[in-house]
Amino acid sequence: MREGVKEMGMIELDGALGEGGGQILRTSLTLAMITGQPFRIRRIRANRSKPGLMRQHLVAVQAAAQVCGADVSGASLGSQELEFIPGTLRGGDYRFAIGSAGSCTLVLQTVLPALLYAEVPSTLRVCGGTHNPMAPPVQFLQRAWCPRMAEMGAQIDLQLERFGFYPAGGGEVVATVQPCARLAPHEWMTRGERRQGYAESFTAGIPARVAQRELECVGQGMNWSEDQLFARRLPDEQGPGNALMLTLEYEHVTEVFTTFGEKSVTAENVARQAVGQARRYIASGAAVAEYLGDQLMLPLALAGGGGFTVDQASLHARTNAEVIELFLPVRFHFTHRDGLDCCVVEPR
């Protein structure tokens, strides 16, 4: 990817752009590693209640810097300005510890696409939060994202070694990545026929009846039978924590919807939230839901083309598109086709 990249000046980014969250930083880090293009970002996460770098964002910066030997300034907790000058991308074995319940998956999503362009295979071990409300859980990457990446030619494997619930963290994920000469363009315009749907309630260090109540409510809301409802009891030391996960497998895509138990929220309300997400997606008729759509944008841009129908073309997605277009010679188009929101990327 670096071949033919012109020497250009520093890309200047405003962290308050559009949605104004951490995705602006993560996308910039990924593309800087791949293209060799340096950037400077100001007002990091300006639209969040606690602006600046939180632990998971700082580890993403540190991971990116280590993987490509970058020169970095401003990499400290709470920092609202960062300069990142990438060096040479290097595959190999890496270990990154977030040291909190900060999301392992967001760190992985920053580094994994870049390591596809390394010359040798890579293994990453990331410790921190694996299941928290502000990021996709590991199973989302395993079931929804990795298979779509495989369709584009990427070989990425994820193993969940230990759950890490918010707020304690302590989880561990191991990822292996094979070099990929070039990602292939792909389209997901229809989801195809449904193959199966099932719910899982993961609990650790809390009463087993919580899972039972959640699954009973899901069964009623989704009209699912008992053989589609699974209580997954984890060792107490991995808690306390509770994640309710609905997985819908279709011919062309798999979607995962997750909600989390918390104090003062009933098991029934946790279940109703998950059911609501799944039913909205089903009713939309789109190939992918909002979060998977967001995560497909960067790979499609690296491939130089493709697209998908999505249940909601969010401000988050449009912001991500603007950032990607600063680094790569592509253009995103958000259209409405046959009653569905559609995102298409093409060469510029």
Image (spheres, rainbow, N blue to C red):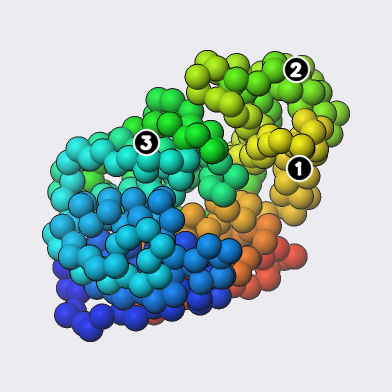
Q: Which of 166 and 187 is in front in this view?
A: 166
Q: How far, Cα to Cα, is label 3 from label 1?
A: 28 Å
Q: In the image, what residue occupies the spot 53% across and 62% down?
A: 50
Q: Name the residue under label 2.
A: 209
Q: Residues within 10 Å of mark 2 (few under 14, many from 20)?
A: few
User: Which residue type does callout 3 highlight?
Assistant: Cys
Q: Residue 2: percent from the left, percent from the top?
A: 19, 66
Q: Mark 3 points at which residue?
A: 127
Q: Which of 94 and 295 is in front in this view?
A: 94
Quarter of the image holding residue 150? top left
Which circle, 3 or 1, is nearer the viewer?
3
Quarter of the image holding residue 346? bottom left
Q: Quadrant of the C terminus?
A: bottom left
Q: Quick one: label 3 or label 1, which is nearer the N terminus?
A: 3
Q: In the image, 46: left or right of 92?
A: right
Note whether 198 is above or below 34 in the view shown. above
Q: In the image, 297: left or right of 310?
A: left
